[in-house]
Amino acid sequence: MDYDRIKEAAEKYRPDMVRFLRDMISHPSESCDEKAVVACIKAEMEKLEFDRVEVDGLGNIIGWMGEGDKIIAIDSHIDTVGIGNIENWDADPYKGYETDELIYGRGGSDQEGGMASAVYGAKIMKDLGLIPEGYKVMIVGSVQEEDCDGMCWQYIYNKDGIVPEFVISTEPTDGGIYRGHRGRMEIRVDVKGISCHGSAPERGDNAIYKMADILADVRSLNENGCGPDEEIKGLMKMLEPEFNPDHYEDARFLGRGTCTVSQIFYTSPSRCAVADSCAISIDRRMTAGETWDSCLEEIRQLPSCVKYGDDVRVSMYMYDRPSWTGEVY
């Protein structure tokens, strides 16, 4: 393979790639609102004479180069998180401010920059005859990843019936080549209490106080070691053959799992009453040997959750927001 020719072609397309990325950034594209950026990408693919361009039922934009039966897929999610407080930005996040070194804007790195690279990478592969015989290249701009990462590709596999031989994700790695990453799930913990007037809190059962105990245990689960003196064995235990005999080597490669509390909610009749419920969201990153069932059970078996018994409910979040096409998957 002639890498000099590839670099030369990439340099030739540099102005077009910069313009394309800035065009994508200019379209706000939070999860479930990607319609405008999909249209932008579709137009670019058609201009570059992709062999086929389509939008599936969920709203993923898919472009094809080549005619083989086997598929090499390159994925970039094209939805972004919001911008938060715009006053915290140094420049308009939807203008794609450009310097000699960077393009500044929401989605520039995560992950519309990857989309620009993938689209023009496929064009260069076609121009230089680099698509292997018997293969075709599938460029995917996937939707709703920030809301429910993984669902977009589950839809492509289950509903579109597309099964690539190999998938490259353009998630930013600072130029590194990574061959795996941890899994992720979102866990919710609900605690029940009994409200009463705040002047006599002993008459009630404060759900926030119960949750405070659970919060401490969740923190210990993430931070503790796994020695014999630890009542709560930390998540690093999955790196040890004693706790993870079949997968500890893969877990050491991927890194230990983690958990952190990302949101907290409560209900109370007023600010002068005892809280009658409290809930938290836990962002759980999973390593080899962990499953969603095992992660839920791990929380249920925390000492505080056992202590409060039926007043505690541990569950996995379910996702049912309609995509920009109206599809619910």
Image: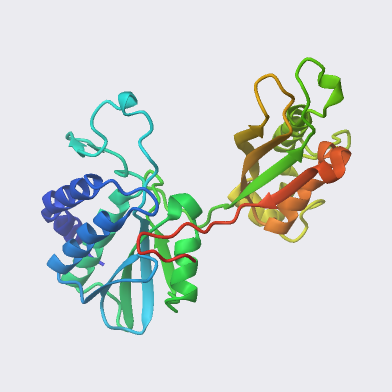
The answer to which quarter of the image holds residue 230 is: top right
Coloration of the structure image: rainbow
The location of residue 163, given as percent across then percent down, is 45, 76
The answer to which quarter of the image holds residue 36 is: bottom left
Is residue 3 visible in the rendered image? The answer is no
In the image, residue 195 sits, relative to residue 31, either above or below, namely above
Residue at the image point whose x is 28% and y is 46% from the top: 28
In the image, residue 127 sits, relative to residue 239, either above or below, namely below
184 relative to 161 in the view: left or right = right
Q: Nearer the viewer, residue 314 or 290?
A: 314
Residue at the image point whose x is 65% and y is 49% from the top: 252
159 relative to 318 in the view: left or right = left
The location of residue 286, given as percent across then percent down, is 63, 51
Q: Quadrant of the N terminus?
A: bottom left
The location of residue 96, given as percent across then percent down, is 21, 39
In the image, residue 303 sits, relative to residue 255, either above or below, namely above
Q: Nearer the viewer, residue 11 or 103?
A: 103
The location of residue 80, given as percent across then percent down, is 37, 46
Is residue 314 visible in the rendered image? The answer is yes
45 relative to 155 in the view: left or right = left
Residue at the image point whose x is 81% and y is 42% from the top: 311
Q: Which of 5 and 274 is in front in this view?
A: 274
